[in-house]
């Protein structure tokens, strides 16, 4: 069995959180504390250092925040771990299909 060299295996929760907030601040839309996603939702760094996800919806030509979720350091770390495990699972399934075809 192969294991990936993942972010969660190389970083502490604090280091991964710092890397993520730095990325958001440097990819922003000019505001230096937020970035716009492909869905036009907003991910921003709050004054307390937490990460805020806001889901935006346009209604009658006006944009409204319809939901928001604040992520703390361990929430973010857990999400990275989840996504990396999903990716691992995807690779393992692809490998199993390939092996079945080769058999």
Image (cartoon, helix red, strand yellow):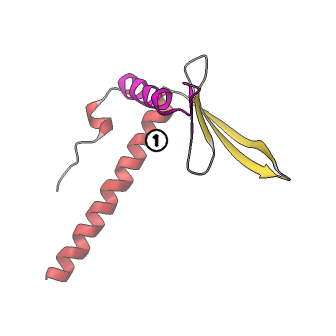
Residue 22 within the magenta-colored segment of the rendering: yes
| Residue occupying image coordinates x 39% and y 27% | 19
Q: Position of residue 31 (x, y in %)?
A: 59, 26
Q: Quadrant of residue 43?
A: top right
Q: Is residue 68 above or below residue 97?
A: above
Q: Is residue 66 above or below residue 32?
A: below
Q: Nearer the viewer, residue 56 or 6?
A: 56
| Residue occupying image coordinates x 61% and y 22% | 46
| Residue occupying image coordinates x 78% and y 43% | 64
| Residue, far front | 30
Q: Position of residue 102 (x, y in %)?
A: 14, 81
Q: Quadrant of the C terminus?
A: bottom left
Element under disc 1: helix
Q: Nearer the viewer, residue 26 or 96?
A: 26
Q: Position of residue 82 (x, y in %)?
A: 42, 46
Residue 30 within the magenta-colored segment of the rendering: yes
Q: Quadrant of the N terminus?
A: bottom left
- Please indicate whether residue 62 sits to the left or right of residue 13 in the image: right
- Mark 1 is surrounded, within 10 Å at the Cα level, by few (under 14), some (14 to 19) or many (20 or more) other residues, namely few
* Residue ID for mark 1: 79
- Please indicate whether residue 55 sits to the left or right of residue 4 in the image: right
Q: Quadrant of residue 70?
A: top right
Q: Position of residue 33 (x, y in %)?
A: 56, 25
| Residue, far top | 48
| Residue occupying image coordinates x 74% and y 49% | 57
Q: Main secondary structure of the magenta part?
A: helix
The segment highlighted magenta reads: 14-36
- Please indicate whether residue 3 sits to the left or right of residue 67 in the image: left
């Amino acid at each position: 069995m192969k294991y990936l060299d993942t972010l969660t295996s190389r970083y502490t929760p604090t280091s991964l959180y710092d890397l993520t907030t730095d990325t958001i601040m440097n990819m922003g839309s000019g505001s230096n504390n937020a970035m716009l996603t492909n869905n036009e939702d907003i991910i921003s760094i709050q004054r307390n250092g937490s990460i805020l996800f806001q889901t935006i919806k346009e209604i009658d030509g006006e944009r409204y925040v319809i939901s928001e979720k604040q992520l703390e350091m361990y929430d973010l770390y857990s999400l990275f771990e989840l996504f990396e495990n999903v990716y691992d699972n995807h690779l393992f399934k692809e490998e199993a299909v390939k092996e079945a075809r080769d058999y």
